[in-house]
Image (tube, helix red, strand yellow):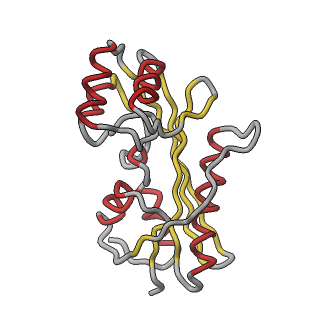
Amino acid sequence: MSDLILASTSRYRAELLGRLRLPFSSEAPHVDETALPGEAPVALATRLALAKARAVAGRRPGSWVIGSDQVAELDGNPLGKPGTVEAACAQLAAMSGRQVHFHTALCLANGAQALQASDLTTVRFRSLSGEEIRRYIAAEQPLDCAGSFKCEGLGISLFEAIDNHDPTALVGLPLIALSCLLRQAGYGLP
């Protein structure tokens, strides 16, 4: 079977992919993640997942490469990774008591072949006080996470509900869809 490469340096995605018990390596895709003017969040996630997979596949002929990207959307606008405590506080305050959509796109590429899938997750945030937001950010430091939370940790306490088809999608790599794509590519799962 061809080498399997995760086009990401995200430890969250690597941990998720490890659940499938397939040998893989990780490689940074070095893709500009800037949104194009007027680009919708779902289109941005799809474009970036494909670009990440193709960037690494171009350097690794014969390998299957997994690219994934997630874009959070509030009122039609993308929310990026906050990067700072102040930006994380502002994001969580804006999402307090609201629904936020998370578009997670996936691409499995090998040469010219590219298999794609996506997941839409809707998160309903409960009303959050400023003190709750500050305590949460201090506890988990989710500065590298779209939406400023880690649903696999304490961030789950910020929600009223999650609606999706794949619980791993919100972490950043939809394993149900990925398993389907890997089977199409010839991998035996389980």
* Residue 123 locus on image (x, y percent): 42, 29
Q: Is residue 6 above or below residue 47?
A: below
Instruction: Depth check: give the residue in front, 10 or 170.
Output: 10
Q: Residue at x 61, y 60 (%)?
A: 31
* Residue 91 locus on image (x, y percent): 46, 26
Q: Is residue 61 above or below residue 15?
A: below
Q: Is residue 31 above or below residue 148?
A: below
Which residue lies most toward the right here?
A: 37
Q: Residue at x 43, y 44 (%)?
A: 165
* Residue 159 locus on image (x, y percent): 33, 25
Residue 173 position by quadrant: bottom left
- Quarter of the picture containing the C terminus is bottom left
Q: Is residue 142 above or below residue 168?
A: above
Q: Residue at x 54, y 57 (%)?
A: 106
Residue 74 position by quadrant: top right
- Quarter of the picture containing the N terminus is bottom left
Q: How many marks?
A: 0
Q: Residue at x 60, y 48 (%)?
A: 45
Instruction: Depth check: give the residue in front, 142 or 102.
Output: 142
* Residue 80 locus on image (x, y percent): 53, 38
